[in-house]
Amino acid sequence: MRRTLALIALLLATPAALHAAESGDTTVKLDIAYKTIEQRSLCLDLHYPAAPKPGAKYPLVVFTHGGGWSAGNKTIPDRGVRSLGVSALTARGFCVASVDYRLCTKDGKITMRDCVTDSKDALRYLAKNAAQFSLDADHVFTFGDSAGGHIAQMLLLSPPDSFPGDPKLADAKYRLIAGVSWYGPCDFERTELFNRPGESGVRDRFGPRIVKSGADAKDKLAAYREVSPANYLKPDSPPLLMIQGDKDTTIPVHHARYMKKRADTVKAPVEILIVENSGHNWREIGGPLHPSVDEIANKTAAFMTQHLERSFTKSNHHE
């Protein structure tokens, strides 16, 4: 009980603490190799709150970057939307793991499934080595932007033993609490969700990144369904917040609304927040964003803080 109260107090960070984190006042461990595949080490960075306390166990947020599954990396710039999101989380006492994963290739040898598998292995590695990195594997969250938002949904909603990767990590144990997706897609089978305003018909933009070269129609459908987060929604799914721009033409707002509709059908806990005047990457279109990027970052952190507190409350009720 004392540990619970202390952690909750830490999470209720003051605006001054948030400002300090935004100024770069965090502790970072860089380039931690979580697995080796095809003679290449895949790494992650750990972003801790300022001045980590000896003996502390930090709730973990696994952050997966965007880039269309074919570009991008784990680096969190000093400025920009990702930095604001990570800073808001570390200011509230979370440790954020920013993950590199294999990127899709034009020859189809590496697909979206591999991106998800690698990211799951990063989570498994951190859970298995939680004590070494002062992490709480019983309180894990997912977060990502664009393609990374999709991966964050997959990590949150798909069964822990799905997308098996490194056999050495298969026995990792962890508990997922909640997740947040920034402008990430939710269903690839529903190609109409990718249509821009006024468009109709089929707009299959990401098929080559989902299906390996030479796949037949049956395998193609199975692959689309396997990497579609909407197909994993259940009444007992961890809570998900999807934040989407109303003028995003890369990942249209239809995805958030469709995910909410699917979730309501099966009574899964999904919330959506539609950002006005926002294109992809929170780019302003036709006016100021509402809510602002700062507010989006704070709402992201507040959502995770809320569900972290609830998870401790539930644990106390069962003691």
Image: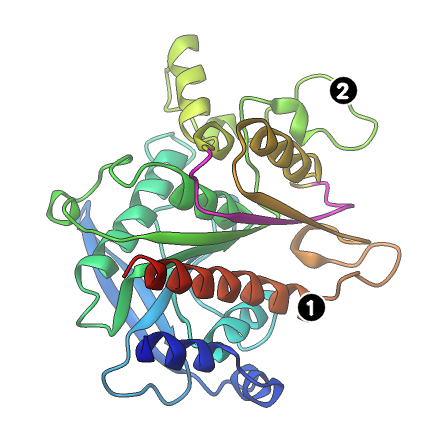
Q: Residue at x 25, y 61 (%)?
A: 126
Q: Residue at x 25, y 67 (%)?
A: 32
For the residue pair 79 and 60, the one nearer the viewer reads as 60
As displayed, is residue 32 above or below residue 181?
A: below
Could you tell me the amino acid type at mark 1?
Answer: Glu
Q: Which mark is residue 66?
A: none
What is the secondary structure assignment of the residue under circle 2?
loop
Main secondary structure along the magenta-highlighted residues: loop
Left or right, 132 with respect to 95, comes to: left
**Crowding at label 1, few (<14), some or many (≥20) Cα neighbours within 10 Å?**
some
Q: State which quadrant residue 222 falls in.
A: top left
The answer, for residue 6, to whether it is visible in the render is: yes
Q: Label 1 belongs to which residue?
A: 295
Query: Which portion, as a residue range, is magenta?
Result: 235-249
Residue 193 sits above or below residue 316 on the image: above
Q: Quadrant of the C terminus?
A: bottom left
- Identify the image's colour scheme: rainbow, by chain, secondary structure or one colour: rainbow
Residue that numbered label 2 is attached to: 200
Tell me: 70 left or right of 319. Answer: right
Question: Would you say residue 240 sits in the magenta stretch?
Answer: yes
Q: Residue furthest top?
A: 217
How many neighbours does mark 2 have within 10 angstroms: few (below 14), some (14-19), or many (20 or more)?
Answer: few
Residue 105's spot in the image, x, y percent?
40, 37
Horizontal and vertical percent position of residue 135: 27, 69
Percent of width and height locating residue 106: 43, 34
